[in-house]
Amino acid sequence: MAIVYRSVQIPSDLLEALGDTSELFWSDPAIEPIIHDAIRAWLKNPPSTTPQQSASATPRNRAGYQWKQVFLPAGTRLRASYARKPYFAVVTGNRIRHGTQNLSPSAFANLHGSGTRNAWHTIWLRFPGNEHWLLADTCRARQNAAIARMFGSGTQKPSA
């Protein structure tokens, strides 16, 4: 495979987000294969240019990860920390990716430490287009409340 050397300008916020997700500093040469993979993935599934398609997207017909009653759309970032050091993952397609690993929420929460951490209480979520991090348990509680309202107050909450 031939390699063409060409400078490309990348916004700093995009490089920082890539660094957060990959746990690599933006100037680390090891980040190049991650950028290549991201471009290849985008070429396989370019974003829809038809507004009608994106407006009709629902959890059943768009990429994302279904975590019990909480749907994490593709692009959702996950953050956890151990010994005050954060680590990150991102929902890509229908998987949670940390570097080259595909993980469940529990496996991500327990990457470091004793392996007995509750993912709902350990993982913070940042949904696409949102700048705020939310504790996964808060998202679950909101979803449970919405489900209870939908079916009336006499129904039981879905279990964890």
Image (spheres, rainbow, N blue to C red):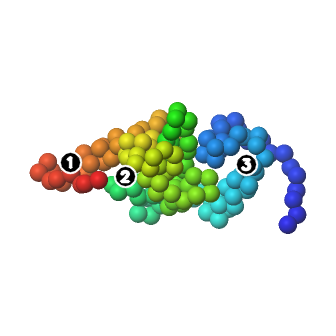
Q: Is residue 76 visible?
A: no
In the rendered image, the quadrant that contains the N terminus is bottom right
Residue type of the residue flagged with mark 1: Arg
> Amino acid type of disc 2?
Val
Q: Residues within 10 Å of mark 2 (few under 14, many from 20)?
A: some
Nearer-the-camera pick, 108 or 135: 108
Q: Is residue 39 left or right of residue 21?
A: right
Which mark, residue 19?
none
Helix, strand or loop at mark 3: helix
What residue would you read off at disc 3? 31
Q: In terms of depth relative to the viewer, which is nearer, 44 or 56?
A: 44
Report which residue position mark 1 lands on. 149
Secondary structure, mark 1, is helix
- What residue is drawn where x is 57% and y is 52%? 98
CA separation, marks 1 and 2? 16 Å
Residue that carries the numbered disc 2 in the rendered image: 70
* Residue type, mark 3 in image: Ile
Q: Can you give x and y, in whole percent of width and height, for residue 77 in the image?
A: 52, 46
Tag in front: 2 or 3 = 3
Other-residue count near label 1 (Cα within 10 Å), few / some / many at <14 / 14–19 / ≥20: few
Asked if labels 1 and 3 touch by Cβ distance under 8 angstroms, the answer is no
Q: In the figure, 19 relative to 43: above or below?
A: above
Considering the numbered disc 2 on the image, is that residue within a helix, a strand or a loop? strand
Q: Quadrant of residue 65?
A: bottom left
